[in-house]
Amino acid sequence: QVQLVESGGGLVQPGGSLRLSCAASGFIFRLNDMAWYRQAPGKQRELVARITTGGLTNYQDSVKGRFTISRDMAKSTVSLQMNSLNPEDTAVYYCNARSRSTSRVTWGQGTQVTVSS
């Protein structure tokens, strides 16, 4: 069964940090580009960060210098380290996989991140 399971969301104060993790199963992890998206209330889902099969990364401008995406090929996990969080980062964060070989897209169920004092 193809599955992505996110963890690590929660409530944090402005300026704080959180680390999101996504565990992949049921597909060949090393053949997939991995990404984190987010969706705030009333807004469209947007790309936050992506890491390719080769380790290349790209970020949304608003998170550059604050967020870091990484992947562990041995554990089939992808993480998002989020620092200097602000209320505008409040959203449901989704893990995403896109296969280089089949173009299949897989989504996780999402994890809530709330930045508030």
Image: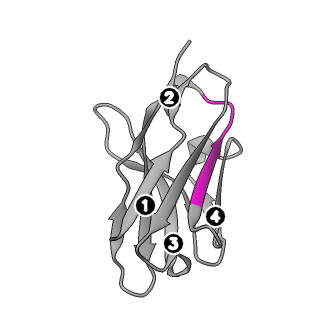
Spatial CA distance of label 3 from label 4 is 10 Å
Is tag 4's residue or tag 1's residue first in the polypeptide sequence? 4
Q: Which mark is residue 62?
A: none
For label 2, the SS is helix
> Neighbour class for label 2 at 10 Å: few (<14), some, many (≥20)?
few
Secondary structure found at label 3: strand
Quarter of the picture containing the C terminus is: top right
* Residue tagged 2: 88
Q: Looking at the image, which residue is at 51% across and 75% down?
A: 29
Q: Position of residue 60 (x, y in %)?
A: 55, 50
Q: Eyeballing the image, is 74 above or below 92?
A: below
Depth check: 113 or 23 in front?
23
Q: Amino acid at mark 1?
A: Asn
In magenta, the rendered stretch is 78-85
Q: Mark 1 or mark 3, which has the lower sequence index? A: 3
* Distance from the alpha carbon under mark 3 to that under mark 2: 26 Å
Percent coordinates x, y for residue 59 in the rendering: 59, 54
Q: Residues within 10 Å of mark 3 (few under 14, many from 20)?
A: many
- Residue sitting at x 60%, y 61%: 58
The extreme bottom residue here reads 101
Residue 96's disc number: 1
Cα gap from disc 2 to disc 1, whole angstroms? 21 Å
Position above or below: 67 against 96: above
